[in-house]
Amino acid sequence: MKLKKIGKMSDLEKIWLMTQHVKEDNQVVACKFCDHLTPMLGTGVCDNCWEVVRRIEKFLKSAAGRVYLRHLIDSYESKKENTENDQD
């Protein structure tokens, strides 16, 4: 089988590296924040959510960070309301 090289690693090598933290029995749980499946049984948090949780407090110390997050939340809520109204 010929493997496509991306950078210095093949696709197969990258997949192997990404799956090294998965236990042999391949158990997964739903992330407690976003419900994506994660092999992180101890924390119950996927990689993306773990990064957010780990960094959010420092980000919130910045006034600009708080403004940006408020904007994102407002945009999300506005889109959600528009979607719900379109379904009615």
Image (cartoon, rainbow, N blue to C red):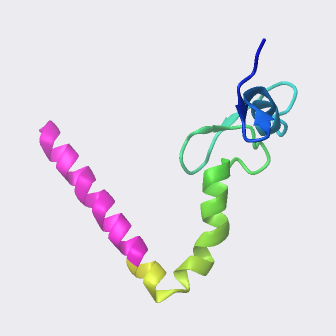
Is residue 82 part of the magenta span, yes or no?
yes
Relative height, residue 52 to residue 88 (above, below): below
Residue at 16%, 37% (x, y): give it: 87
Residue at 61%, 55% (x, y): give it: 49
Relative height, residue 2 to residue 36 (above, below): above
Please give left or right for residue 27 compared with residue 30 in the image.
right
Residue at 77%, 26% (x, y): give it: 12
Viewport quadrant of the N terminus: top right
* Residue extending farthest top: 1
- In this view of the protein, which residue sits in the foreground, 4 or 25? 4
Relative height, residue 73 to residue 26 (above, below): below
Q: Quadrant of residue 54?
A: bottom right
- In this view of the protein, which residue sits in the foreground, 85 or 68? 68
Q: Position of residue 32 (x, y in %)?
A: 60, 48
Residue numbers of the magenta segment = 68-88
- In this view of the protein, which residue sits in the foreground, 25 or 6? 6
Please give left or right for residue 88 compared with residue 30 in the image.
left
Q: Position of residue 61 (x, y in %)?
A: 55, 86
Q: Quadrant of residue 78?
A: bottom left
Viewport quadrant of the C terminus: top left
